[in-house]
């Protein structure tokens, strides 16, 4: 016990650095995946069949394969083909590759949630808007969007919470997020070796982060109750 107390400040500092990387990947993924998911949703609902089929094929492939494999392909495959790493070296390159992988993966999941929310709006509302002389863009932003948001908040909340935990997969390409930081003390880091408790302690970070997100998303859902 005395040894753990002695090691605690070193471990906490390292986990804090790793968790900042986790949070950075989390927010970058959301910033990129939210708009890209909407674009993909529009593509899959397009009346232009080649675009619709192509978009649905991409979504099917991304949703049907493990994110871990996608990370490995995006990070290593271009270098194998071009014989030159396109992401650069070091932590910056790994973070960029991880961000691209996560954004594409979560955009495909978000697109299906968007599509379900949009198609769940009664078609009569769109027809009424057209009769009133509104354009399709006006109908989407003034009629469909707010109702869609109310419908997609619960499933989107689940995906966002899952994203927090999925960031741990980035360690497969040696991104130094919090799980990587916790594991490093098992192998030997900063004078500490064979310590497994830092890895278990990372769960506290995830619990706190997801607890805060659950409260925030729950309040957002309540604020949108007036759309019922």
Image: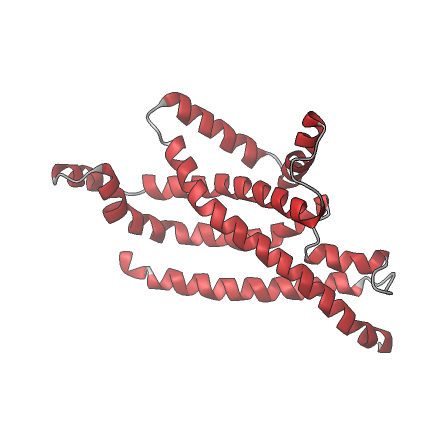
Q: Looking at the image, is 221 positioned above or below residue 108?
A: below
Image coordinates of residue 171 in percent, x first then y, are 71, 49
In the rendered image, the residue lying farthest to the left is 132
Horizontal and vertical percent position of residue 53? 43, 24
Q: Position of residue 59 (x, y in %)?
A: 50, 33
Scheme by which the image is coloured: secondary structure
The residue depicted at 49 percent of the width and 42 percent of the height is: 107
Say whether residue 228 is visible: no
Total count of labels? 0
Q: Position of residue 183 (x, y in %)?
A: 78, 56
In the image, taking residue 83 as reference, residue 1 lies left or right, namely right
Left or right placement of residue 136 versus residue 214 in this view: left
The answer to whether residue 184 of the structure is visible from this angle is: yes
Question: What residue do we see at 85% from left, 56% from top?
Answer: 187
Looking at the image, is 43 positioned above or below residue 18? above
Locate the C terminus and report the quarter of the image it occupies: bottom left
Front-most of residues 92 and 181: 92
> Which quadrant does the N terminus fall into?
bottom right
> Picture quarter containing residue 45?
top left
Q: For residue 70, what is the image quadrant?
A: top right
């Amino acid at each position: 016990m005395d040894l753990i107390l002695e090691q605690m400040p070193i471990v906490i500092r390292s986990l804090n650095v790793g968790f900042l990387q986790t949070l950075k990947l989390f927010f970058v993924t959301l910033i990129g995946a939210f708009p890209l998911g909407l674009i993909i949703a529009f593509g899959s609902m397009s009346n232009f069949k080649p675009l619709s089929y192509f978009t649905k094929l991409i979504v099917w492939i991304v949703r049907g394969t493990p994110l871990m494999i996608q990370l490995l392909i995006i990070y290593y495959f271009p270098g194998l083909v071009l014989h030159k790493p396109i992401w650069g070296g070091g932590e910056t390159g790994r973070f960029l590759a991880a961000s691209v992988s996560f954004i594409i993966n979560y955009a495909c999941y978000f697109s299906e949630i968007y599509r379900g929310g949009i198609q769940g709006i009664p078609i009569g509302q769109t027809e009424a808007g057209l009769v009133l002389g509104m354009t399709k863009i006006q109908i989407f932003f003034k009629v469909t969007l707010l109702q869609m948001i109310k419908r997609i908040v619960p499933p989107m909340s689940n995906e966002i919470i899952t994203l927090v935990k999925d960031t741990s997969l980035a360690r497969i390409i040696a991104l130094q997020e919090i799980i990587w930081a916790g594991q490093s003390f098992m192998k030997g880091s900063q004078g500490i070796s064979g310590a497994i408790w830092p890895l278990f302690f990372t769960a506290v970070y995830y619990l706190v982060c997801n607890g805060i997100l659950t409260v925030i998303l729950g309040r957002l859902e309540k604020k949108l109750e007036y759309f019922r």
